[in-house]
Amino acid sequence: MSSKPPAVLTGPHYWDGDYACAEGAIAAGCRFFAGYPITPSTEVAERIAERFPLVGGTFIQMEDELASMAAILGAAWGGARTMTVTSGPGFSLMQENIGLGVMTETPCVVVNVQRGGPSTGLPTLTGQQDMMQARWGSHGDYEIIALSPSSPQECFDLTITSFNLSERFRLPVLLMMDECVGHMTEKVVVPKPESIKVLPRRWYRGPRDKYRPYQPDADLVPPMVRAGDDYRFHITGLTHDQRGYPVINAACQNLCVSRLVDKIRNNADHITLLDEQDTAGADVVVVSYGISYRVATKAIADARKKDIRVGSLRLVTVWPFPEKRIRELASKVRCLVMPEINLGQMFREMQRATVGTGCRTLLVPHCGGWVHNPNDILAAIVEGTK
Amino acid sequence: MKYWRKPLDADRCKSPHGEIHIIHDRCKGCGFCITYCPRKVLEFSKDFNRKGYHPPTVVKPEACVNCGLCETICPEFAIWSTKVEECAVEQ
Amino acid sequence: MKEIEPVERHPHEEYLRMDRIPHIWCPTCGLGTILNAFITALKRSDIPRQDIAIVSGIGCTGRTAGYVLMDSFHSTHGRALPYATGLKLANPRLKVVVISGDGDLVAIGGNHLIHAARRNMDLAVICANNFNYAMTGGQFGPTTPETARTTTAPYGSYEHPFNVPFLVDSCGATYVARWTALHVRHLTTCFGEMLNHKGFSFTEVISPCPTVYARRNRLGSGLDLLQFYRENSVIRNNIDTRECDIRFQAQMIVGKFVQKEKPTYLDMMNTYLAEAVGKKFVPYVGPMDPAKE
């Protein structure tokens, strides 16, 4: 009797973020993956290609990113838990089908291991330059959920969270990693399978003849079925009614699209994950996410040595933007400092959220290709006390 | 059907026979069924349907052999035939 | 326009979303005929209806998914094939049929077409070729014959078009055929064969487009085009697909060109991994099952 490798590799490991993300997907029950190689996300695909045949998953390398995104949507309707990974250029290619996923309310996870852009940019070096694209990349009005891990451990944990959120709210969830976190090797502790909370798919349980693909529950999310169970449903990217049939007029657009947006906005409190430290009584709070948080911790420690009362708010959920908490903090602190490896993306959201509070906002930008020098963040913190 | 001589078992042979059903208001007057019916059973009706087209009308009901071509070729699902009792082979 | 409830029901109505009939296709368009032949073939097939899923792309032909009363998916332009690939791989029990147009499958979807054929993915693909992008008003596409007039080639097309059967044959498709909307008997048989075929099956169905293509090129109505197909299509089964070029209003070769057996993508994947990975190999666990959760 041969022992097959377990799906969940319980115990401590020394993994990089990409590997941890792949293992997180497997632990979350992902058994279908379609992807296309692109630095720095390729290791996720490679790890999955190696592990899936040992845990009963299907891996396919598609011909491009457009096909990868389309395939994971189709597979989700076939009844599988699905994921793809990419980086900036591939993320751009996937946008149309991400829109299809949002419109058809298809649960899946899309991982973007960000690199320097625009265009081919810096394939092997870090960036956080796709943050706005995560929110607005596809055409039309929609809301999206995006998470940002700051360590390989979080790459494992937040991949599972991403799957859970995608099942709960029925849409593609974006995991916005970056090359640094993806290629950085740290201790990752994988818990026992029974400790890992995996949310089951929200299956429809009502009478068969009463099934309407887009009739929502009270939380604005409709339950789902899979192909092959004789529900005879129709799914389209056209604006549709509750039956899933295209209805091409403004009234239907209003109903259809408003619900897709409200589904996320109204439930933002259940989606927002924050890591807050020492913000009570702080003069300056550093708002950061991803790898920039790790660098900011050094700047914060140095600032404390200068007796500056500084706190940290780490955005684990980046979209929907946690404007409520930002606004609350803005009314209490003197300045919010945001370091990000871009020329101001999430910063604009932060500014928008602080309008009218009198709170100062300072951006510590970085063009990409490396992480911030902590002294630059420290200088902004010091500036924020003035 | 024309034969060059009368088949010896003509009195025993029966030809399949069909009855045409038409949903007039579904027809868009394409003419496929009329043109391609092998027995020339149908013609354009002089009447209009609600959409303003001339749907087919059965002019030679006895000639229909229930081949089902009209049923399959119709783009609108407006015409089909059902099997009815076989009739004698025509001369 | 609300239909008066007919007293009688067409035999195919149980396979149609009757709340969406009448469909949007023009009078004398061939797409309704192709759908009709497909349903005829479905009814004769012994594949359980719940095991069939239809995926279509964008365009007039792409609307087909919205009219069949089965699990159907109307995806994005050109991406019906990878969508169908994902659907099939997630639930291999399904027979996935892709019904889409020439522009959707061969232009924007061209890359996906060649790879799905190369992989011998177990999909049945019905390509309705009306030689233009009809839904958007009649622009030319990679199947538009030379000299044909379209809105984006108002003086006539000067691009070499694809020979689509040759294209998919050269990529490894294991069932390749071409018929026209007139050949309803052949279509019904052909679709039936495709439903039973294991591997990538592809049929190009030449279909009349009366409102744009035929009108701009003064070819008459769809009925006139069907008459043209009748007089100018020649059945040559098993001919080398290289010979199957289509020139503008010239003789067309139709028939079943390729029918062969080759391991499908799933056959290859499972056999190879079982051997290469050995005892540790765990075959795909299948889709999540609501009954078990």
Image (cartoon, coloured by chain):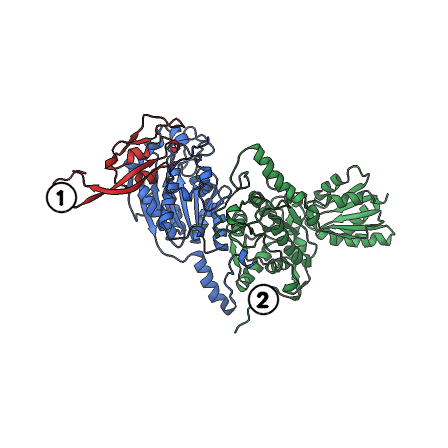
The x and y percentages for residue A357 are 80, 39
Mark 2–mark 1 CB contact (< 8 Å): no
Which residue corresponds to mark 1? B7
**Which chain letter goes with mark 2?**
A
Q: Residues within 10 Å of mark 2 (few under 14, many from 20)?
A: few
C-alpha gap between disc 2 and disc 1: 77 Å
State which chain is coloured blue: C
Q: Residue at the location (61% across, 64% down)?
A: A8
Reply above or below: C136 against C187. Answer: above
Residue B62, disc: none
**Which chain letter goes with mark 1?**
B
Q: Colour of chain B?
A: red
State which chain is coloured green: A
| Nearer to the camera, C52 or A63 | C52
Badge 1 amino acid: Pro
The x and y percentages for residue C108 are 48, 41
Q: Is residue A111 among what the camera can see?
A: no
Which residue corresponds to mark 2? A6
